[in-house]
Image (tube, rainbow, N blue to C red):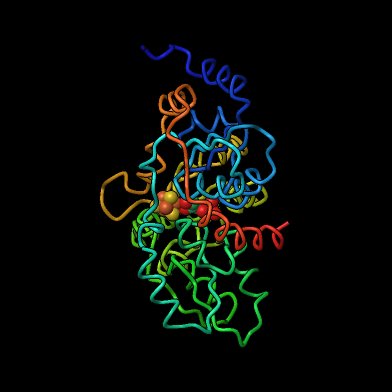
Amino acid sequence: GALPLDLFTAIENLKKELNAVILAHYYQEPDIQDIADFIGDSLQLSKAAADTNADAIVFAGVHFMAETAKILNPEKMVLLPDLDAGCSLADSCPPNKFAALKAANPDHLVVSYINCSAEIKAMSDIICTSSNAVKIVQQIPKEQPIIFAPDRNLGRYVMEQTGRNLLLWEGSCIVHETFSEKKIVQLKIEHPDAEVIAHPECETTVLRHADFIGSTAALLKYCQRSSAQEFIVATEPGIIHQMQKQAPSKLFIPAPPTNNCNCNECPFMRLNTLEKLYLAMKNRTPEITMSEETRVKALRPIQRMLEISV
Ligand code: 13P
Ligand code: SF4
């Protein structure tokens, strides 16, 4: 049938019908953020998924996020508007290759960034997000060797912050590696009072220009409390919707990519649209599923993270 003209009302109605909660990441398009019950960074979203008493979770984010929600809620229906909404970090770490690295380093503890598949989580000792990676590594005894996967940029940042050596998986986020150091420096010259804020998935060449580094939620908070009036934002520009809502008088300039493209927008996150969100709820598909064996193994390291992040 034809799409209803008022998708907002149609989605609200379906939400009641399904007793569903809509969770959205900060990188989603503004319309999706505006209809969501909860918007957050990866850690906040996994906490929200762990705490909800809705019957269904509609995840407006990427696959690994919806999968994490399902691992925490095996009895609930977890819908993802587009199953192709993946992540270059999760894709960079195939389970068979990761198993080989683990087997070659049996004395290492495995700390995995939440941006990975359930299979990788199942092989991990503890999960972290960009909000708590430094804290989690700091809590591990100094003499304990660690494999950190799959983001080499976050890994390097954690190494710098903790003074620890980590065995890094060479994965990266295609979005956070597109920012141009040269263009950021140029913007700083044009806006001498602007502060540069960056996500730790960015390369060292970009991070060295940052006045503040943090997860999406931390960047959002920083913009509110800083006295600066202008910010150069080195992360996916979807977050700027919330930054502008919280501080309408401030100026937020998206950090430019090297090429003249929209490649600072996450192509996976942007696969979700309001239409697909509506259709997923109406048709109760696509739904996240996984084997119970993988789910149980993947749950333990997530729970460990949640226990120390409260
Ligand atoms: P956070 O949500 O932890 O800031 O991570 C950003 C990201 O790239 C999610 O895919
Ligand atoms: Fe993955 Fe990067 Fe997209 Fe986040 S922004 S989902 S890390 S590709």
Q: Position of residue 32 (x, y in %)?
A: 50, 31
Q: In the displayed structure, does residue 132 sit left or right of residue 79? A: right
Can residue 87 be seen?
Answer: yes
Q: Residue at x 56, y 55 (%)?
A: 215
Q: Residue 279 sits in which quadrant?
A: top left
Can residue 193 be seen?
Answer: no
Q: In the displayed structure, does residue 51 sit left or right of residue 240? A: right
Which of the pair 27/94 is nearer the observer? Answer: 94
Q: Which quadrant does the N terminus fall into? A: top left
Q: Which quadrant does the C terminus fall into? A: bottom right
Q: Please identify the residue farthest to the left as the structure is shown.
A: 260
Q: Residue at x 36, y 67 (%)?
A: 96
Q: Position of residue 301 (x, y in %)?
A: 60, 63
Q: Position of residue 238 (x, y in %)?
A: 47, 41
Q: Residue at x 65, y 48 (%)?
A: 47
Q: Residue 135 sits in which quadrant?
A: bottom right
